[in-house]
Image (tube, rainbow, N blue to C red):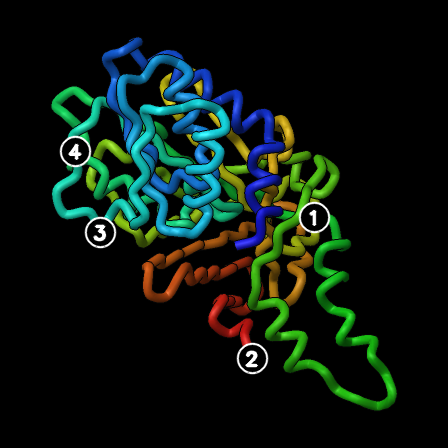
Amino acid sequence: MPIEFHRNMLADKPRNDAFYRALKSVIKKNKTIVADLGSGTGLLGFMASKLGAKTVYMYESADVIGLSQKLAKDNKIKNCHFIHEYSTAIIDPPEVDLVVSETLGNYAFEEHMIATLQDAKRFLKPGGVMIPQRVEQFVAPVVSPRFFDELTIWDDVGYGLDFAEAKRMGLNNIYVRTFGQKDLLDGGKAAKCWDKADFSKKTSNNRKGKTNWKLDKQTTIYGFAVWWNCELLPGIELSTSPDAPKTHWEQLYFPVLEPLKLNKGDSFSVEIESKTSFESGTILKWQISASGFKKQVLDLEKGFI
């Protein structure tokens, strides 16, 4: 993995500040034992150490752990123990007071956060704390044509050639994009929660939710914007909402196969489903239904050659 990936994360001040505040509110000097799962360059574990954690266990399967060890030495951090392995592969982990893990993606669960945190419960002492604690995912209809138009240039290739199949594949994909108020139905106020995950409870890697809207004016729908809110601890949140402070994460664009030209009073809905595994990664499907239109079924697996 290129160092650029980690540079982008460490340049994300809203992210870093939120985790720092969460750690600071929990860590008791010379008492709290911490496990940092997916520790990367070591930022969160180093924060915990600087805040007075007694011991910090750093679990990282990637080779960046070598850089993390060098950084710990350079910063004279001596109470971090580095384990070059996925935390889920550890048979008998030392018990800790606090588990922290930042494995969020543009799509919240693409980096196996649910599987990691469900497994991490066995790391915790009775009464132990986990950061983060909850994620909610939101969806809003997109009313600006610019995102859809970008993906349908296949119609304009010309020379008497038909690229319809390439266009179809392109629309069966999700795209990292940044949305403004004018891009979304009712300026984004029409956004609805389609999924909630509480890591203190048994939570499935597979997510599914459906939302619907009824229009109060004539509108064309060009797809859907998806983002998340993550509660690290009560009162401390991170969000990729268009209205939230900008982070290295962005929103996601879920296209339609054909724009929905709808009238006042018409209803429409989207159902989103994701399946995530270490073997297959994350597969997303979304289905769009609307008054007077044939159901549109899109699937990320159809977007690859």
Asked whether the beta carbons under mark 3 and mark 4 sit within 8 Å of each other, the answer is: no
Residue 64 location (% of width, % of height): 46, 47
Whichever of callouts 2 and 1 sits on the residue coming sooner in the sequence is 1
Residue 154 higher or lower than 125, as above or below: below
Q: Residue at x 54, y 58 (%)?
A: 290
Q: How far, Cα to Cα, is label 3 from label 4?
A: 13 Å
Whichever of callouts 1 and 4 sits on the residue coming sooner in the sequence is 4
SS class of the residue under badge 2? loop
Q: Give the residue number, with chain letter if any, for mark 2.
A: 305
The front one of 162 and 11 is 11
Q: Quick check: can you spot residue 193?
A: no
Residue type at mark 1? Val
Asked whether the beta carbons under mark 2 and mark 1 sit within 8 Å of each other, the answer is: no
The front one of 94 and 88 is 94
Asked whether the beta carbons under mark 3 and mark 1 sit within 8 Å of each other, the answer is: no
In the figure, residue 293 lies in which quadrant? bottom right
Q: How far, Cα to Cα, is label 2 from label 4?
A: 45 Å
- Local packing at callout 3 (Cα closer than 10 Å; few below 14, some 14-19, many 20+) is few
Q: Give the residue number, with chain letter if any, for mark 1.
A: 143
Q: Give the residue number, with chain letter if any, for mark 4.
A: 94
Q: How far, Cα to Cα, is label 1 from label 4?
A: 51 Å
Whichever of callouts 3 and 4 sits on the residue coming sooner in the sequence is 3
Residue 243 location (% of width, % of height): 63, 29
- Residue 223, which numbered label? none
Q: Give the residue number, with chain letter if any, for mark 3.
A: 89
